Amino acid sequence: MDEEEENPDEVLHNTDGLVWGLYSHLWRKTHRGQPCPNINLPHTVIYKNARPIAWYFTSVRDNMIYRKQKKKVVGQLIWEAMSAGQDPNVDACAWFSGNMTLLASQPKKTKGSQHPEAVQYELEPAEETKESASFEYLPSERVHHLTYPGQYTVILEQIYDGILQKFVAPREAHDSIIRAIWSPTACVCERRTNRNVLSDLTKPLSSRIASFENGTAREQDGCVSADCTLHVKAEAHLVRY
């Protein structure tokens, strides 16, 4: 964990979509010497130009936000953190928002230098290399291939830029999500709960995850009342910070 100088890309801007500098500002200490309080941040990795550049998380030891040292922001450690403690009945491992690079479907094969009989793949970008920005939940196998595929694994995509965050399974059987629209004078919260059981592996992952982006055919909306108190308090902490 370190306190390196801020990257210019981490400056907050009034924009739609990904706010790159948000996690850096939550991590930075105030005049009291502490980061933004009472924010439970799962392992969150920021990618730029096809490589991980920053990793933020809330420590279970003192409930404070930290940033990993640059030397520890590597694929193997990212995969281990994303997959640690995963519920075997839930196949969602992480969510990703951003752009991915498509690689050639016919990679060239070359002999490995240290192991003559091993086959090493030289991956080449496909003609249409960059996919449009997306938001999706990823199963363990896909997270593994994107973060730490191994030396002799053929991969057809890689993260170009975006945010990869560990998925935290809900306590209930159904996945739910809360959307908060905040202003200095009001906070409007809305909950959406998926009708399908999250652990029902007979259905696609996308049909078991709660989302405000998809249609409402498989989801039910609910009013958020007193059970949203903690979420509203978290929003208040963000504004004061």
Image (cartoon, rainbow, N blue to C red):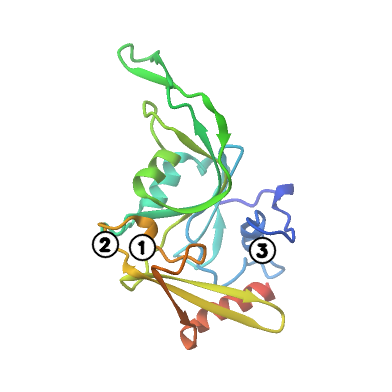
Helix, strand or loop under label 3: loop
Picture residue at 52% right of the left edge, 43% below the top:
73
Circle nearer the N terminus (1, 2): 2
Q: Residues within 10 Å of mark 1 (few under 14, many from 20)?
A: many
Residue picked out by circle 2: 200
Query: How far is mark 3 from mark 1, CA to CA?
Result: 38 Å
- SS of the residue under disc 2: loop
Contact (Cβ within 8 Å) of mark 3 with mark 2: no
Residue in view at x 47 percent, y 60 percent: 42
Task: Specify the quadrant of the image occupied by residue 187.
Answer: bottom right
Question: Cβ–Cβ below 8 Å for labels 1 and 2?
Answer: yes
- Per the image, the residue denoted by label 1 is 208
Residue at x 34%, y 44% (from the top left corner):
141
Considering the numbered disc 1 on the image, is that residue within a helix, a strand or a loop?
Answer: loop
Q: Percent x, y for residue 123?
A: 47, 24
- The type of residue carrying mark 2 is Asp
Residue 29 is marked as: 3
Could you say which quadrant of the image residue 56 lies in?
A: bottom right
Q: Residue 235: horizontal and vertical position, in percent?
A: 60, 75
The quadrant in which residue 51 appears is: top right
Residue 72, placed above or below residue 44: above
Q: Nearer the viewer, residue 160 or 30?
A: 160
Gap in angstroms between the C-alphas marked 3 and 2: 42 Å
